[in-house]
C-alpha cells in the first residue's frame, strides 16, 4: 500500500484515538491514564522483542522482527520517547480542560510549526503558496479563539489552550525527528515503534512513582475501558505512519498534514457525541485549517 493511503488510514485511527483520550481523562487523573495507556501499547510489542532476541527466524511475519540497535540507536529512540511523552502530558491536560471540538483543531495546527521549524533549523525555503497556507491557518486559529469565547474559553489566558499549544509545538518537533530517524538513519519502522513504546513507559515511570505518594488534593484515578484502547489505537495508527514514512519518496510535508485531517473526526465526535456547541463556527474554522494544511503540502 502506498505511503499516502497508509497516512490516510492513520489519520482515521487518530480521530478515534482522540475520542478514547477524552473519555479516559474525564474527571480522572491524567498521569495514570497516560502511563497505563502507554503500557498497553508496550505490552503488545514486548513478546516480539523477546522472541526476536531468542529465535528471530521462527517469527510468523517479517514486520514483527525487532532488529538489534547500537547504543546510539537506543539513545536516539529514547530521546524521541522523552519528546513524545512531554507532548502527551501537555495534550492530555489540555484535552481534559477543553471541548474536543476545540482541542483537536488546536493540535491540528502542528504542521504550521513543522514548516516554521524546518525553515529555522534546516533553512528550507517555503513557496508563496506555503506561506499563504501559513497565513490561512493563523487566521483560522484566531477565528477559533472567537468561537471559544462563546463557550467561555479565553485563548490568551485559558490553561487548557496553553497545554494544547505546548503539545502542538512538541508534536511538530517530533514529526521532524521522525524523518531524521527513519530516513536519515534508516531505522526500521517496527523497531522504532517497539523500542519507542517501551522507552515511553520508562520515561514516565518516575512520575508515576512520585504520584503514588498521594499528595493532598490529588485528583483520584478510576479505571476506564478507554485507557487500554488509547494505547492500542495509537499503536495501529503509528504503525501505519512509520511504515508510510519509511517508504522511499515519502514526504513528511505531505504525511503530517494528512494525519492532521483527523481533526474532522474530532470535530464530529465532539459535536454529535459530547453535544458540544458552535458547530457552524467551528466547522468553518476547521475548513480553514484543512485548506491551510493542504497548501503547506
Image (cartoon, grey):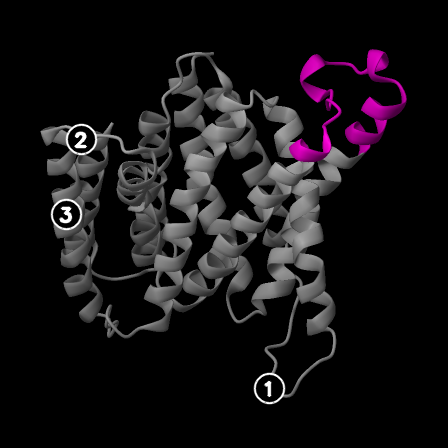
Pointer 3: what residue? 284
How far separated are the C-alphas under marks 3 and 2? 17 Å
Q: Residue at horizontal 35%, vertical 62%?
A: 99
Q: Nearer the viewer, mark 3 or mark 1?
A: 1
Determine whether 276 is above or below 60 in the image.
below
Q: Which secondary structure dominates the residues rendered in magenta?
A: helix
| Picture coordinates of residue 154, whole percent (x, y) | 23, 72
State yes or no: residue 50 in magenta: yes
Pointer 2: what residue? 295
Pointer 1: what residue? 217
- Provide the secondary structure element on which disc 2 rests: helix
Q: Which residues are magenta?
A: 47-73
Q: Nearer the viewer, mark 3 or mark 2?
A: 2
| Picture coordinates of residue 104, whole percent (x, y) | 35, 51
Q: Residue at horizontal 55%, vertical 59%?
A: 24
Marks 1 and 2, the one that precedes in the sequence:
1
Disc 2 crowd, CA 10 A, few/some/many (<14, 14-19, 20+) = many
Determine whether 4 is above or below 89 in the image.
above
Disc 1 crowd, CA 10 A, few/some/many (<14, 14-19, 20+) = few
Amino acid at each position: 500500500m502506498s505511503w499516502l493511503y497508509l497516512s490516510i488510514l492513520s489519520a482515521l485511527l487518530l480521530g478515534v484515538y482522540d475520542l478514547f483520550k477524552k473519555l479516559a481523562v474525564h474527571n480522572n487523573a491524567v498521569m495514570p491514564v497516560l502511563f497505563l495507556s502507554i503500557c498497553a501499547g508496550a505490552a503488545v510489542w514486548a513478546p516480539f522483542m523477546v522472541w526476536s532476541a531468542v529465535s528471530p527466524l521462527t517469527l510468523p511475519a517479517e514486520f514483527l522482527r525487532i532488529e538489534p540497535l547500537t547504543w546510539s540507536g537506543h539513545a536516539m529512540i529514547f530521546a524521541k520517547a522523552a519528546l513524545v511523552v512531554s507532548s502527551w502530558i501537555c495534550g492530555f491536560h489540555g484535552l481534559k480542560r477543553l471541548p474536543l471540538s476545540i482541542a483537536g483543531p488546536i493540535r491540528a495546527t502542528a504542521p504550521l510549526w513543522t514548516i516554521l521549524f524546518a525553515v529555522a533549523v534546516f533553512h528550507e525555503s517555503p513557496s508563496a503558496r506555503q506561506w499563504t497556507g501559513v497565513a490561512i491557518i493563523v487566521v483560522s486559529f484566531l477565528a477559533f479563539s472567537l468561537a471559544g469565547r462563546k463557550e467561555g474559553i479565553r485563548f490568551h489566558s485559558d490553561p487548557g489552550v496553553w497545554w494544547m499549544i505546548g503539545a502542538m509545538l512538541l508534536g511538530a518537533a517530533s514529526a521532524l525527528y521522525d524523518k531524521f530517524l527513519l530516513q536519515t538513519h534508516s531505522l526500521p519502522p517496527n523497531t522504532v515503534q517497539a523500542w519507542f513504546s517501551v522507552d515511553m513507559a520508562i520515561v514516565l515511570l518516575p512520575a508515576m512513582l512520585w504520584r503514588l505518594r498521594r499528595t493532598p488534593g490529588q485528583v483520584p484515578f478510576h479505571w476506564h475501558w478507554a485507557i487500554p484502547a488509547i494505547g492500542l489505537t495509537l499503536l495501529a495508527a503509528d504503525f501505519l505512519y512509520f511504515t508510510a514514512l519509511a517508504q522511499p519518496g515519502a514526504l513528511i510535508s505531505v504525511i503530517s498534514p494528512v494525519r492532521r485531517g483527523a481533526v474532522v473526526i474530532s470535530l464530529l465526535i465532539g459535536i454529535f457525541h459530547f453535544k458540544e456547541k458552535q458547530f457552524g463556527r467551528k466547522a468553518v474554522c476547521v475548513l480553514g485549517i484543512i485548506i491551510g494544511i493542504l497548501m503547506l503540502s
